[in-house]
Image (cartoon, helix red, strand yellow):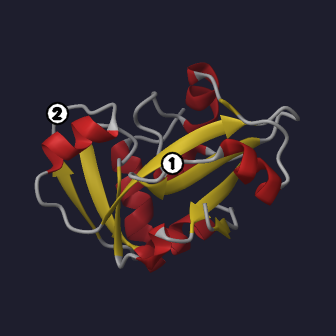
Amino acid sequence: MAASEADLFRRLDELGIKTDTVRHPPVFTVEEARAHRGTIAGGHCKSLFLKDRSGMLWLIVMLEDSRLNMRLTEKVLGAQRFSFASPELMRAVLGVEPGSVTPFSLVNDTAKEVRVVLQEAMLAHERLNYHPLTNTATTTIATQDLLTFVRAQGHEPVIAAL
């Protein structure tokens, strides 16, 4: 069974990670998120759950205004032809619904199937914002704490200039 938002916050507490969360109506796009988030400080981010032709799963996390050049990113990462993973695969591996994918979803990747890629420019921010497993809230986390969380879930992130 997938971790709930409460399970995620317990895990963050276990790791000594402090966060702030703001509730808002469900958002499915960057534009909707901008309309509802108000003045939450920090870098606002998006996450893409991809699959390559070999079956490898990828979670690419970047600043919300960034555009991913998939072909160039495939070359940089040594991936074989990216496509978006299906909602069913997202639910099975990351335990979240479309519109809610986030690096916090790694709490559900107990089989360590996903390769994590974090945008270098995103990590230049002191604080970052992600959905806490649901798109009805935004959680702010210190950048170093995000790295601690990702590694504590058994993933060593690739940091790349996307």
Residue 125 visible in image:
yes
* Residue topped by disc 1: 67
Of the numbered discs 2 and 1, the one sitting upstream in the chain is: 2
Residue 30 is situated, as x and y percent measured from the top left of the image, at 32, 41
Give the Cα separation between the discs numbered 2 and 1. Answer: 25 Å
Relative placement, left or right, of 76 versus 25 is right
* Residue topped by disc 2: 25
Relative placement, left or right, of 151 versus 7 is right
Q: Residue at x 65, y 29 (%)?
A: 85
Secondary structure under the numbered disc 1 in the rendered image: loop
Q: Quadrant of the N terminus?
A: top right
Image quadrant assignment for residue 161: bottom right
Residue 135 is situated, as x and y percent measured from the top left of the image, at 31, 37
Furthest residue toward right:
54
Using the image, determine if residue 75 lies above or below residue 101. below
Relative placement, left or right, of 17 versus 159 is left
Q: Residue at x 33, y 34 (%)?
A: 29
Q: Could you say which is closer to the camera, residue 91 or residue 143?
A: 143
Using the image, determine if residue 150 lies above or below residue 18. above
Image quadrant assignment for residue 120: bottom right
Q: Residues within 10 Å of mark 2 (few under 14, many from 20)?
A: few
Q: How many marks?
A: 2
Q: Residue at x 40, y 32 (%)?
A: 99
Secondary structure under the numbered disc 2 in the rendered image: loop
Q: Are marks 2 and 1 in contact (CB under 8 Å)?
A: no
Residue 113 visible in image:
no
Using the image, determine if residue 78 lies above or below residue 159. above
Q: Quadrant of the C terminus?
A: bottom right
Q: Amino acid at mark 2?
A: Pro
Q: Residue at x 81, y 53 (%)?
A: 75
Q: Amino acid at mark 1?
A: Arg
